[in-house]
Structures are given as structure tokens and as C-alpha cells.
Image (cartoon, rainbow, N blue to C red):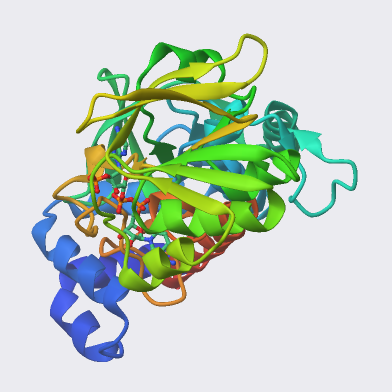
């Protein structure tokens, strides 16, 4: 079997492999390095066979293990299962991800009448299962990518081995943490102006935050809404000058400096907010039907700290126009690696890319 011969050659002559393959084929080089460290040739050969033989695959090494169940993870599962990789997907602590707290999704192509976020995630799940994806409840609590096969531990107790890993753990919006915010979440409180701004066209809204996201979203909302009140907790913004200037020169955006939110008002929907000037202590009530929180996002990548290259905010680095990470066989997609677009459709797009990258990677080590 060609596959096993390759495995044996690699183990017996990693150096020759390095010289034979082109210098830019980093996955082969990393694999050769690993193989030099692995003493047990027979063990490797049998595991490698498992990866490429669907009959043996599930029993031993999972060919494609997907971590996270938002649009990126489910789309990766659809593509990977259709490619015959028999993917296993662990849903994580919030199955379905951020869309589970989104009501109407009106900007995902293919739904002319819109769709509820939870329904869309259910549909994506069913679609992946239709092609054989194995969707499991559980949270990946640690990983070990120091040797091949890659290892993940689920719920701190079960450890699985995988040939490829797709990270689609998403990001979570940061929230103010006040009671009225969680009570009215989805009833006028939102962390995504692009997703939900349309529902407030012609109305008055409030946005909290002073970074580039808040400025960008305030500007976006100003084109749809009658008035946007922006609450900035300090006397200056963190956002880039150009973004600040855009906000400050927009007539229907009013910035309230040194202002914090005490309470979001309303029972069944947002009716306004009670705010306080931190310097003077003066309180006031602002009337609005929408309340947008734009104080940053936190990518859910903590378990990959020190293992996968990330930026200073925890977003995973991927190589050029691909989903490859710095570890061979590990791919990242969706909001875990994208702090710019953060849309369901872009997450789904990169999920597709990750599955294709994983499939190509498996083919490359096979041949
Ligand atoms: P940031 O972390 O840059 O900004 C968060 C903002 O929220 C800060 O101004 C912070 O205030 C404020 N904030 C935090 N907690 C609270 C709170 N409890 N109450 C009130 N305000 C609070 O996050 P962003 O999402 O804006 O940006 C993340 C990254 O993405 C940045 O690097 C940014 O440049 C980039 N980005 C770039 C864009 C572009 O170039 N087009 C668009 C969007 C984002 P304080 O300043 O007082 O700490």
C-alpha cells in the first residue's frame, strides 16, 4: 500500500524527505521533524492507515475534528462530511454560537423572508448530519499539538486523537454586565449593528463604546436611524482619529462623554436608558428603542494559548488566503480568526475553506 510505504520511508529517512520535497512545503517538513522524534514505526503506520481508511478511522484516529458549532463549524462539517472525512464536531458550551441569541437573520443569502438565528443553526446542524457528520455535545478543555496525531481532551476527561483539527470556537461579544442588559437581550439590546440595525430604521438608538467598532457601528446606524446617542465612558475615544472624526462630524450622532449606563429601561422591549455623568454625578434618561453594545469581542481561543499563534487580542493567525495556522494539520475559521467582518456568512465561508484545506492537507500527507 503506497501510503504505508510513504510512512515507512518518512520514518526511516526523514532527512531524505526534507531534501526531496520543495522547501516551501512546510507541512511535509514539520511532519518529517515529528517523525524523526517518533520511535515506534509500526504504531505510526497503523495510525496513518486509520486516517485514510474510513473503516478504521472512527475507532482510532479521527480524520477531522471540528471544535465549535457556529456557522463556521457547521459549514466545515458539511464540506468535510461530503468529502468523506467523517468529521466529528464538538459543539462547545453554547451550541450554535452567537446566532442562538439573534432573532431575525435577514442578511444571510438564500432566506428572502429572513430566518430566526436558532432555526438557522438547527438547519445547518441537520444539513451536516445528513452527510454523516458526527455532532457531539462536549467542550474541548485542552489540546496537545506537540506530536502527531493531534490530541484534544473533551470535558477534562476523554482524550481523542485527530489527523486534522478545525478551530471554529467563535468569539463572544463583551457585555456591560448589568441585569437589564441580559433581560432585554434580543428585545432591543444587541451587540451587532450590522445584524440588527435595520430593525430600528427611523428610530432613536443608543450605542455604548468608544473603539473602532463602536464608531463604525454608530456611523452605520446613523444612516438608518433618526438619532444615535453614543455613550463614551471617558473624556476621549480609543478609536482611530479618522473613525472618531467621522462620528463627530455626523449630525445625527450625539456623543455623551464621561457617561456610564446605569440601567436599560423597558419591560418587553427597550424604551431607553438611565445614564450618569461620571464627573458630575448627574443622571439623565435617554429615550430609545434600540441599545447597542460595542465594547469589544473576546475570541474563544484561550485553550490554544501558547500552542497556536495569535495576535495580542487572541485572534488566531492564519496563513495568507487560507485557514492554515502555524501548526500543521490545524486550521482556524470564523470569528476565532476574524476580527474584521464577523458575519455569519463570512464565518460560513471560512468554514468551507477550512474543510477544503483539511482535505487537501490529508491528501498531501497521503501522497
Ligand atoms: P476595543 O477594545 O478597541 O474598544 C473597546 C471600547 O469599549 C473602548 O473604547 C472601551 O473604553 C469601551 N469599553 C469597554 N468596556 C466598557 C464598559 N464596560 N462600558 C463602556 N465602555 C466600555 O474594541 P473594538 O471592538 O472597538 O476593536 C477591536 C479591534 O478591532 C481594535 O484593534 C480595532 O482597531 C479593530 N477594528 C478595526 C476596524 C477598522 O479598522 N475598520 C473596525 C472595528 C474594529 P476605554 O477606551 O475607556 O477602555
Q: Looking at the image, which residue sits at the far right?
A: 112
- Give the residue at x 18% y 62%: 35
Task: Identify which residue is drawn at 25% across, 66% down.
Answer: 31
Q: Is 138 rendered above or below residue 363?
A: above
Residue 100 appears left or right of 3: right
Say which quarter of the image contains residue 28. Answer: bottom left
Q: Quadrant of residue 178?
A: top left
Q: Is residue 97 above or below residue 285?
A: below
Please state the horizontal and vertical placement of residue 278, each as a whole percent of the image: 23, 30
Which residue lies at the image location 24% right of the left edge and 58% below the top edge?
Answer: 310
The residue shown at (49%, 29%) is 91
Q: Camera-side residue: 209 or 81? A: 209
Q: Is residue 130 left or right of residue 279?
A: right
285 shown above or below 73: above
* Residue 27 picture location, percent across and down: 31, 71
Position of the C terminus, as image quadrant, is: bottom left
Residue 231 position within the rendered picture, expressed as x and y whole percent measured from the top left: 40, 40
Using the image as rendered, state which of residue 143 and residue 249 is in the foreground. 249
Residue at the far top in the pictured view: 267
Q: Is residue 192 left or right of residue 282?
A: right
- Residue 169 visible (yes or no): no
Residue 336: tell me if it is visible.
Answer: yes
Q: So how many labels did they put on this image?
A: 0
Comparing 139 with 8, the one in front is 139
Camera-side residue of 4 and 210: 210
Residue 185, x across and y down, in percent: 56, 22
Amino acid at each position: 500500500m503506497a501510503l504505508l510505504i510513504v510512512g515507512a520511508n518518512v520514518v526511516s529517512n526523514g532527512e531524505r524527505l526534507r531534501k526531496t520535497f520543495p522547501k516551501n512545503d512546510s507541512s511535509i517538513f514539520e511532519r518529517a521533524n515529528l517523525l524523526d522524534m517518533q520511535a515506534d514505526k509500526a504504531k505510526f503506520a497503523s495510525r496513518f492507515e486509520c486516517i485514510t481508511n474510513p473503516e478504521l478511522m472512527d475507532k482510532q484516529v479521527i480524520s477531522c475534528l471540528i471544535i465549535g458549532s457556529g456557522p463556521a463549524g457547521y459549514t466545515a462539517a458539511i464540506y468535510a462530511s461530503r468529502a468523506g472525512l467523517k468529521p466529528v464536531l464538538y459543539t462547545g458550551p453554547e451550541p450554535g454560537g452567537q446566532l442562538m441569541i439573534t432573532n431575525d437573520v435577514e442578511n444571510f443569502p438564500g432566506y428572502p423572508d429572513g430566518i430566526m438565528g436558532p432555526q438557522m443553526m438547527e438547519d445547518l446542524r441537520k444539513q451536516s448530519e445528513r452527510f454523516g457528520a458526527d455532532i457531539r455535545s462536549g467542550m474541548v478543555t485542552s489540546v496537545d499539538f506537540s506530536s502527531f496525531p493531534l490530541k484534544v481532551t473533551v470535558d477534562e476527561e476523554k482524550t481523542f486523537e485527530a489527523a486534522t483539527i478545525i478551530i471554529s470556537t467563535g468569539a463572544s461579544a463583551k457585555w456591560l454586565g448589568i441585569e437589564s442588559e441580559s433581560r432585554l437581550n434580543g428585545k432591543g439590546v444587541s451587540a451587532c449593528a450590522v445584524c440588527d440595525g435595520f430593525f430600528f430604521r427611523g428610530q432613536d438608538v443608543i450605542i455604548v463604546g468608544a473603539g473602532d467598532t463602536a464608531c463604525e457601528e454608530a456611523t452605520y446606524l446613523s444612516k438608518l436611524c433618526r438619532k444615535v446617542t453614543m455613550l463614551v465612558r471617558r473624556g476621549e475615544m480609543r478609536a482611530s482619529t479618522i473613525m472618531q472624526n467621522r462620528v463627530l462630524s455626523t449630525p445625527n450622532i450625539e456623543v455623551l462623554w464621561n457617561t456610564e449606563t446605569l440601567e436599560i429601561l423597558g419591560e418587553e422591549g427597550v424604551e431607553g436608558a438611565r445614564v450618569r455623568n461620571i464627573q458630575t454625578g448627574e443622571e439623565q434618561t435617554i429615550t430609545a428603542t434600540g441599545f447597542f453594545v460595542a465594547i469589544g469581542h473576546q475570541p474563544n481561543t484561550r485553550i490554544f494559548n501558547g500552542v497556536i499563534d495569535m495576535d495580542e487580542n487572541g485572534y488566531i493567525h492564519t496563513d495568507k488566503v487560507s485557514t492554515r495556522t502555524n501548526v500543521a494539520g490545524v486550521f482556524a475559521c470564523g470569528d476565532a480568526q476574524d476580527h474584521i467582518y464577523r458575519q455569519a456568512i463570512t464565518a460560513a465561508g471560512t468554514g468551507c475553506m477550512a474543510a477544503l484545506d483539511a482535505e487537501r492537507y490529508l491528501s498531501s500527507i497521503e501522497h
